[in-house]
């Protein structure tokens, strides 16, 4: 394979170099000593080998073999730490008296543009076009590879090449294995937001534009989840999509029923969220249908992307399913003994999302420390269990701008996840009032408030505090829950105040409505509440927390002061980024438009970082990639 490439490079040097630029970021070849060479680096840094032997093949096959042996010798020196730069080119002078490695030369009449000018900015933003970086007396300039003509070492003159700015289209950002396994064009997904905020329309927009969307089924009754399955499958067909599964500690039978529904309806991809420990229904979902193909490779039809923010929880998803739970599934007949054996060789989740400072359930962890920590943990656990598949790690929480996405990919994230920004898009299941409130949000306009699903445990969620009193009122209810043993113990003046301001009804009337709700959803909660006054109080208080989200989704104008709007600091960062652009108008905020702009801007940022590593001066303000209409993005037309 190496010989074939060198032959091409000698006879058609420009075509060979372009094939390297366009084909892949890194081409690897195995030598006869099982040595891996990064061929692109070697060839580009040794242009002198190519041009010095232009006529060799026409004269002697033995000379061709000698050239191959020379390249192999260089690779071996590389392994031993030897220099890879030809001695005559090692310290060629460049602009401003600097000294850099020169890897070749271009014809001096090639069309080049200064890196600091507007044309240089456009060249950098054309992310699918590789460009040579050349040094001139006036500074660095860029020459797109299609416009370049390389010179041989004997030609003399020309402009010195100091590096290559590779093509970096959005489609190549992140992990290729993530895109391949899920059938995606982009390593990006729109995360689930409960109560249908991540609506069928959000999922459809994602699936039709090359990325992934998850329906927000948490908090919804089974009939609504099944209706969403009908809608999404009819619209997307074979396009990728997924559904949410949330850990419901207060109603475990609902989690079990949801898993039954997913298995029955053939939902093969879920986003598991808010798990503190693995549950039997979740393990059952993962193992269901596991088998081997004709070659003996383990096939798992059901896939899990787990959202976690704690190392101890992540460790459970990086590891195989717990043996104790697997034995229970065998005993119940849900899986066979053979499937139990296979389960020991798979991780619970093939993808784990590091959930940093996000809206809703969050530990407010900083992404810059959480992601590398989980990646290192993944590697340790994979080395211990040696499962056939090594889990991938992505990042959620704070992803709403090109800079944040680029940082995630630079740290090694296999994919990125957005949440808050999708709620502000017109396809979300939220209301126009909420979208307007989100468009005015800044990063400090947030607060933590008690969660409805884990109220008794004191678990909190991150919500919007600007324009709503929900966080303060919910905190007051949790304070009362901690202080008193039941509704009857609450002092009359306090009880009167919360009935008037929070519930707008008597607590007895609120209890009757709550009782009716749970009689249909989970009657066991009522049986317990009638025996335990404190649990009855918790259900009443949780009713306010649950309704507050519905009021926001429905846009109830009489309850705007009580809206519960899950939101993270990413929303404020997004608003700042799009200020003055067409995306400042909420009517233009569409899921695909937002995603494509974030990804394209991230690709531009990645190319800027490559140039910075070469010591190249960049145009002022290039870090701020202004949003562009999606049709222009697809044509790579940017200002």
Image (cartoon, helix red, strand yellow):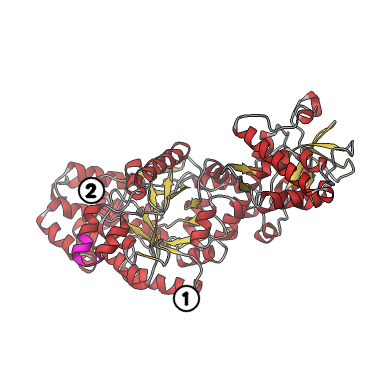
Disc 2: which residue: 456
Q: Is residue 9 magenta?
A: no
Secondary structure category for the residue under label 1 = helix
Instruction: Answer yes or no: is residue 520 visible.
Output: yes
**In percent of the image, x 54 and y 54: which residue is there?**
176
Is the residue marked by circle 2 packed among few (<14), some (14-19), or many (20+) residues within 10 Å? some
Residue 476: where, in percent of width, then height? 28, 44
Is residue 314 found left or right of 188 in the rendered image? left
Decide which of tag 1 and tag 2 comes sooner along the chain. Answer: 1
Disc 1: which residue: 234
Is residue 280 found left or right of 562 in the rendered image? left
Q: Nearer the viewer, residue 442 or 2?
A: 2
Is the residue marked by circle 1 packed among few (<14), some (14-19), or many (20+) residues within 10 Å? few
Secondary structure category for the residue under label 2 = helix
For the record, the magenta segment spans: 328-336
Residue 542: where, in percent of width, then height? 26, 54
Please, is residue 379 above or below residue 562 in the view? above
């Amino acid at each position: 394979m190496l010989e074939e490439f060198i032959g091409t490079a000698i006879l058609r040097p420009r075509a060979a170099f372009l094939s390297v630029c366009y084909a892949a970021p890194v081409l690897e070849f195995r030598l006869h000593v099982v040595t891996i060479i990064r061929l692109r680096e070697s060839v580009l840094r040794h242009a002198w080998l190519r041009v010095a032997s232009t006529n060799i093949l026409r004269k002697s096959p033995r000379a061709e073999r000698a050239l191959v042996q020379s390249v192999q010798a260089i690779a071996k020196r590389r392994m031993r730490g030897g220099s890879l730069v030809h001695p005559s080119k090692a310290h060629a002078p460049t602009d401003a008296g600097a000294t850099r490695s020169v890897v070749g030369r271009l014809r001096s009449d090639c069309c080049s543009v200064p890196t600091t000018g507007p044309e240089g900015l456009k060249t950098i933003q054309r992310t699918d076009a590789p460009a040579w970086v050349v040094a001139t007396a006036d500074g660095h300039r860029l020459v797109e590879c299609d416009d370049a003509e390389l010179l041989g070492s004997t030609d003399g003159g020309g402009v010195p090449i100091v590096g290559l700015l590779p093509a970096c289209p959005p489609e190549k950002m992140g992990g290729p294995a993530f895109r391949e396994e899920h059938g995606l064009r982009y390593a990006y997904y729109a995360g689930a937001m409960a109560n249908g905020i991540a609506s069928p329309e959000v999922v459809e927009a994602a699936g039709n534009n090359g990325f992934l969307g998850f329906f927000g089924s948490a908090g919804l009754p089974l009939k609504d989840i099944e209706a969403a399955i009908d809608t999404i499958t009819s619209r997307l067909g074979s396009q990728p999509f997924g559904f949410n599964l949330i850990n419901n500690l207060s109603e475990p039978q609902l989690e079990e029923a949801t898993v039954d529904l997913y298995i029955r309806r053939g939902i093969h991809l879920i986003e598991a969220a808010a798990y503190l420990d693995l549950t039997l229904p979740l393990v059952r979902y993962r193992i269901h249908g596991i088998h081997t193909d004709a070659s003996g490779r383990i096939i798992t039809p059901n896939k899990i992307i787990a959202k976690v923010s704690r190392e101890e929880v992540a460790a459970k998803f990086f590891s195989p399913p717990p043996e104790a739970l697997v034995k229970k599934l065998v005993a119940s007949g849900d899986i066979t003994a053979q499937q139990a054996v296979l389960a020991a060789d798979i991780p619970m989740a093939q993808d784990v999302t590091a959930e940093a400072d996000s809206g809703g359930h969050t530990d407010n962890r900083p992404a810059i420390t959480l992601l590398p920590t989980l990646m290192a943990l993944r590697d340790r656990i994979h080395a211990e269990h040696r499962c056939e598949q090594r889990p991938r790690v992505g990042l959620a929480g704070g992803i709403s701008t090109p800079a944040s996405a680029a940082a995630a990919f630079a740290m090694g994230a296999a994919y990125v996840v957005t949440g808050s920004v999708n709620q502000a898009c017109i396809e979300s299941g939220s209301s126009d009032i909420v979208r307007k409130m989100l468009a005015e949000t800044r990063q400090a306009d947030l607060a933590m408030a008690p969660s409805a699903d884990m109220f008794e445990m004191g678990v909190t969620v991150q919500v919007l505090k600007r324009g709503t009193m929900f966080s303060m009122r919910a905190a007051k209810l949790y304070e009362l829950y901690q202080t008193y043993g039941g509704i009857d113990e609450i002092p009359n003046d306090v009880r009167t105040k919360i009935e008037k301001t929070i519930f707008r009804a008597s607590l007895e009337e609120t209890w009757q409505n709550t009782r009716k709700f749970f009689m249909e959803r989970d009657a066991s909660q009522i049986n317990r509440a009638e025996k335990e006054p404190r649990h009855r109080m918790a259900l009443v208080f949780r009713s306010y927390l649950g309704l507050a989200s519905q009021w926001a989704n429905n846009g109830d104008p009489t309850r705007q002061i009580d809206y519960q709007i899950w939101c993270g600091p990413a929303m404020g960062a997004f608003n700042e980024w799009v200020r003055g652009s067409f995306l400042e108008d909420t009517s233009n905020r569409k899921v695909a438009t937002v995603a494509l702009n974030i990804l394209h801007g991230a690709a531009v940022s990645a190319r800027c970082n490559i140039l910075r590593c070469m010591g190249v001066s960049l145009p002022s303000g290039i870090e701020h990639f202004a949003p562009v209409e999606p049709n222009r993005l697809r044509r790579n037309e940017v200002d």
